[in-house]
Image (cartoon, grey):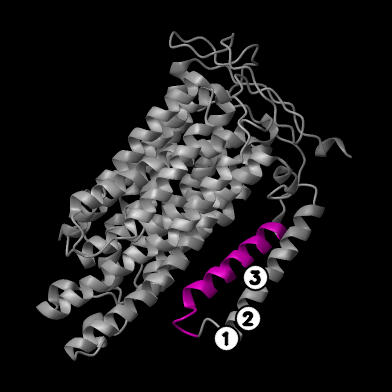
Amino acid sequence: MSQAAAPPRTTPVEMTHRQVLEALSGLLLGLFVAILSSTVVSNALPRIITELRGGQSAYTWVVTSTLLATTATTPLWGKLADLTSKKALVQVSLVIYVLGSVLAGLSQSTGQLIACRVVQGIGAGGLTALAQVIMATMIAPRERGRYSGYLGAVMAVGTIGGPLIGGVIVDTSWLGWRWCFYVGVPFAVAALVVLQKTLKLPVVRREAKIDWWGASLITAAVSLLLVWVSLAGDRYAWVSWQTAAMVGGALLLGALAVRVETRVAEPVIPPKLFRNRTIALATVASVAVGVGMFGASVFLGQYFQISRGQSPTMSGLMTLPMILGLLVSSTVTGRIITRTGRWKRYLVAGSALLTLGFALMGTLRYDTNFWLLSVYMAVIGVGVGMTMQNLVLAVQNTVGPHELGAASSVVAFFRSLGGAVGVSVLGAVLGHRVQGFLADGLARLGVPTSGAAGGGTLPDVHTLPGPVRTVVESAYGHGAGDIFLVATPFALIALIAVCFIREVPLRRHNEPLAAGVERAAPVATGAGTAGKSGRPLSPAPARMTG
């Protein structure tokens, strides 16, 4: 094996608690931009799709396109982070995000909007993956739980603020929905400036090749599968030659991707990582969490606006119980994990709560008592807050510094993949169920289906006559409950997976590990713990410059 293929030996970065917070400020601002890109449109989408004359399929693909781009590029960003300047990469991803946002705001059709959301997703993929990688580079695993709470808090703020900002923008006549895409640009520019001033990391460069063939095959396989899911049952039957061609093509492309990844020197998704039990099980759990977290929650804005007749702003306010649950649980569990070094119990509890929350939301109807609905959403939020960041933390604890980028991006990749598949599958389920409920309800009234749904476009319930409006609200409410029921088994899969993960106490230092080894680290107090007084986070570090 050539010297270029050998992993570089890295050393921890010497940073005090204050320096870590300063460096994280720009990073967290960039992560906020990534979260904002997806959440700011959640409550605005019904209005956007209606004005651009799109239907349920377009609604789904505006979200799916971003998740797909994020999914496809996350492993590439992670691999590049292991090879070159992480600081430069996160700045490039911010620039790509800004470009995609501006173009999305200029869209004149749903097709253009979907294409521009792909560009946004590429930038968001870099921000999401690199935030985890850079934090892991600066902070030892034992201390990482504490700072993971900050990431969870930022994600919660972005998830809270996004829908509210988007709702206010749409409801403000002199702004309009296009400003939903422009609003993140100032935050991205501010993040660029802050990162340039505060982020100083070691630049590790080595001779390597990016696995473009593997990345292309993985992207093609996932894209073909999502196209099939979103169109089946609408443009053609589930059992048809189109289904056979698309599913068969996706499986063939997937098999080719696996063959390429096992043969190249620098695979985008290193197969050897999955020999590690923790990574393999965390991957399964991440897919399941992604399906539920993105797939089910993305349609809540549509539920509140169509089934309950709320404005975009009120739709954002009504999701607060779920987001507050996420904020509190991620922050509190992060601090407890840092203090104890134990994390598995929180993964198990979070997955159980996620399963319970989805099952409860399966009873959702258009007239469900809001206080009861608030409890259900809070249970889901607490479950997501205890699971999402801690799955990444568990994986990072089992690999050496030279594999942090690849390992972190693998978890993010499969979580985004689960989200993209979840949005497509649950969107298709919702469209199919709503169509059936509308047909039954309107048949009883003697009204043609097109009279309520606008010929396949999303309905504006405020313009419908009373009896028809009730049928439409009931159809979308019942359909929303059904997609949470469909998401429940995925949450149960996540629960089963995390139960089988072997808990390894969090390491206090970022020392290199042997490939594929899951090492237990002492939990006892020792040197090298970051103190509030400003002591270094790691022992015997090498000073690094930006």
**Secondary structure under the numbered disc 1 in the rendered image:** loop
Say above or below: 77 vs 423.
above
Q: Residues within 10 Å of mark 2 (few under 14, many from 20)?
A: few
Q: Position of residue 313 (x, y in %)?
A: 19, 54
Residue 384: in sight, yes or no? yes
Q: Position of residue 414 (x, y in %)?
A: 57, 52
Say above or below: 151 vs 275.
above
Q: Residues within 10 Å of mark 3 (few under 14, many from 20)?
A: many
Q: Amino acid at mark 2?
A: Ala
Q: Is residue 232 magenta?
A: yes
Nearest to viewer (mark 3 / mark 2)? 2
Q: Outermost residue, left direction?
A: 466
Q: Are marks 2 and 1 in contact (CB under 8 Å)?
A: yes
Residue at image mark 2: 244
Q: Amino acid at mark 1?
A: Ser
Q: Outermost residue, right direction?
A: 1
User: Distance of mark 3 from mark 2, alpha carbons?
Assistant: 10 Å
Question: Which residues are the magenta region?
Answer: 213-236
Q: Between disc 3 and disc 2, whose residue precedes?
A: 2
Q: Between disc 3 and disc 1, whose residue precedes?
A: 1
Q: Position of residue 91 (x, y in %)?
A: 50, 41
- The numbered disc on residue 250 is 3
**Secondary structure under the numbered disc 3 in the rendered image:** helix
Specify the principal SS of the magenta part. Answer: helix
Q: Amino acid at mark 3?
A: Ala
Nearest to viewer (mark 3 / mark 1)? 1
Residue at image mark 1: 240
**Secondary structure under the numbered disc 2 in the rendered image:** helix
User: Distance of mark 3 from mark 1, alpha carbons?
Assistant: 15 Å
| Between 259 and 431, the one nearer to me in the picture | 431
